[in-house]
């Protein structure tokens, strides 16, 4: 009886042909178990498997490989051994050249806060927040190659074809609002990162859960949201008629191809676009922000303006209901990112300066608004750098050790877990993989990472593959 009732309502909506029917269809199917995503859980404590601490996430991804021993992982032993040739005799996999001599950091380190956390001079603004942060000091990965490393940190796998964390969260928990995408990606205005859009893919999950890419540097961050005014025949009535026709055609096609989620995603995108015509202009309009807020994010400084704008947009988006927002620093390639092969001394300070003040501004803004009570902020990268010189002053790829920090709901302020060896070359204690980071994030959102699965090709896949544990040492 239940199934006959569902199909009769489905038939009615399919025959109705109106825009309101299209808007209702996906909600009806999802609510009654015929859709491709679970019922959305908008309430804070309504996790899938246990009470949630975190409602939404802002992930700050530093593309290219942040040098840990020049930022957060102070290694005085590098100064003592500076110039000595004690590195690997053969070129490790993933490095672009042979290991040179040990190279000390050219930047001054100081202890900050009550926790006494060491931070280098390239991050003076983040240093003020160390007592709010929890550090994973022994992050490691299975590769020292950018593409696979970025895939692993985003999807849990070295190869393409697997959903990223944002897609898993969108699939498992649904949206917090009908008017904005659940998963938003804000790439560097200079270009996409390594793997291009592969880092934001929903892969075998329903297509509607892929990241929505927003070009924050464009005059129209969401392109083609409104009809071009130079065409006189366009307008609200024409938009509505076109949408009705497209929805009717798509519903007919989707009915004939029930296993193809791309049509459902396209239908959902039309519905979301219609709703975003009302919500997006306000969300992306920063003119209402005060001069104090603009200064805190560095919006009027050419050094910090781009990343600061995207950090502010991230705050505005999570405040208005987006579930996951990724903010990327650096495009792919050999310049303008964290891939500092030529000279740590000259390449690291500019990219660090571009994000340092905006990140501190974001944390301060979230805290003052009470958003840190249910928001998690994550800072990470795909791998670290070597303690050995490359050329004269550069550092090569190093997947053996790097640093991640977290701030916000459910995090033990001032905590640190793990350590690298005395050179910062390899993780030594409390070793943490992407699986453990992802398991911890899902746990904070009320999700047991071993139970959030999707069956594809006869296998129950999950974000953490067959690995992962919650890092309880950094949880409050």
Image: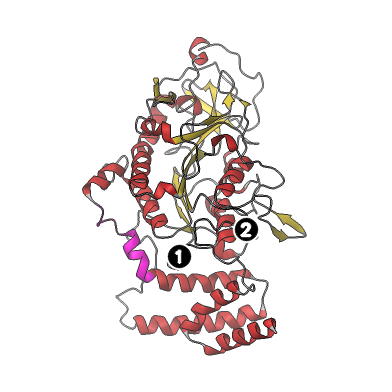
Q: Is residue 53 magenta?
A: no
Secondary structure beneath label 1? loop
**In this rendering, would 95 be left or right of 323?**
right
Which quarter of the image is occupied by the N terminus? Answer: bottom right
Image quadrant assignment for residue 169: bottom right
Q: Nearer the viewer, residue 411 or 339?
A: 411
Report if residue 189 is visible in the image: no
Residue under circle 2? 203
Q: Position of residue 21 (x, y in %)?
A: 50, 83
Secondary structure beneath label 2? loop
Contact, mark 2 vs mark 1 (Cβ under 8 Å)? no
**In this rendering, would 276 be left or right of 267?**
left
**In this rendering, would 361 be left or right of 339?**
left
Alpha-carbon span between mark 2 and mark 1: 23 Å
Residue under circle 1? 177
Q: Which residues are magenta?
A: 277-289
Q: Residue at x 63, y 42 (%)?
A: 435
Q: Position of residue 13 (x, y in %)?
A: 55, 85
Q: Nearer the viewer, residue 446 or 335?
A: 446
Tell me which colouring the rendered structure shows. Answer: secondary structure
């Amino acid at each position: 009886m239940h199934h006959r009732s569902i199909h009769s309502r489905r038939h009615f909506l399919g025959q109705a042909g109106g825009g309101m029917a299209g808007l209702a269809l996906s909600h009806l199917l999802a609510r009654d178990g015929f859709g491709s995503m679970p019922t959305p859980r908008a309430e804070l404590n309504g996790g899938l498997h246990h009470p949630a601490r975190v409602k939404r996430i802002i992930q700050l991804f530093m593309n290219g490989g942040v040098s840990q021993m020049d930022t957060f992982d102070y290694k005085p032993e590098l100064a003592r051994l500076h110039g000595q040739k004690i590195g690997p005799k053969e070129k490790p996999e993933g490095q672009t050249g042979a290991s040179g001599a040990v190279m000390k950091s050219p930047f001054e380190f100081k202890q900050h806060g009550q926790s006494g956390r060491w931070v280098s001079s390239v991050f003076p603004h983040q240093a003020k927040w160390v007592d709010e942060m929890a550090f994973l000091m022994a992050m490691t990965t299975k590769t020292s190659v950018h593409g696979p490393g970025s895939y692993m940190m985003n999807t849990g796998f070295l190869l393409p074809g697997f959903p990223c964390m944002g897609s898993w969260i969108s699939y498992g928990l649904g949206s917090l609002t009908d008017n904005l995408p659940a998963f938003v990606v804000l790439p560097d205005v200079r270009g996409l990162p390594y793997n291009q859009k592969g880092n934001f893919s929903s892969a075998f999950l329903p297509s509607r859960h892929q990241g929505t890419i927003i070009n924050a540097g464009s005059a129209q961050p969401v392109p083609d949201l409104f009809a071009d005014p130079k065409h006189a025949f366009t307008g609200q009535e024409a938009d509505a008629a076109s949408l009705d026709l497209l929805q009717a055609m798509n519903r007919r096609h989707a009915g004939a191809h029930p296993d193809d989620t791309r049509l459902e995603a396209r239908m959902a995108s039309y519905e979301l676009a219609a709703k975003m015509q009302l919500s997006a202009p306000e969300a992306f309009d920063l003119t209402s922000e005060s001069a104090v807020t603009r200064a805190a994010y560095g919006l009027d400084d050419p050094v910090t303006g781009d990343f600061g704008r995207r950090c502010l947009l991230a705050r505005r988006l999570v405040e208005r209901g987006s579930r996951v927002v990724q903010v990327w620093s650096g495009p792919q390639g050999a310049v303008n990112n964290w891939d500092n092969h030529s000279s740590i001394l000259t390449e690291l300070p500019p990219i660090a300066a571009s994000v340092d003040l905006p990140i501190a501004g974001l944390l301060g803004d979230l805290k003052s608004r009470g958003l840190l009570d249910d928001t998690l902020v994550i800072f990470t990268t795909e791998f670290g750098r070597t303690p050995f010189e490359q050329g004269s002053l550069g550092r090569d790829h190093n997947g053996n050790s790097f640093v991640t920090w977290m701030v916000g709901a459910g995090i033990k302020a001032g905590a640190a877990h793990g350590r690298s060896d005395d050179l910062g070359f390899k993780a030594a204690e409390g070793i943490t993989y992407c699986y453990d980071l992802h398991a911890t994030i899902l746990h904070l959102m009320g999700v047991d990472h071993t139970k959030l699965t999707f069956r594809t090709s006869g296998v129950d896949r999950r974000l953490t593959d067959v690995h992962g544990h919650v890092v309880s040492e950094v949880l409050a």
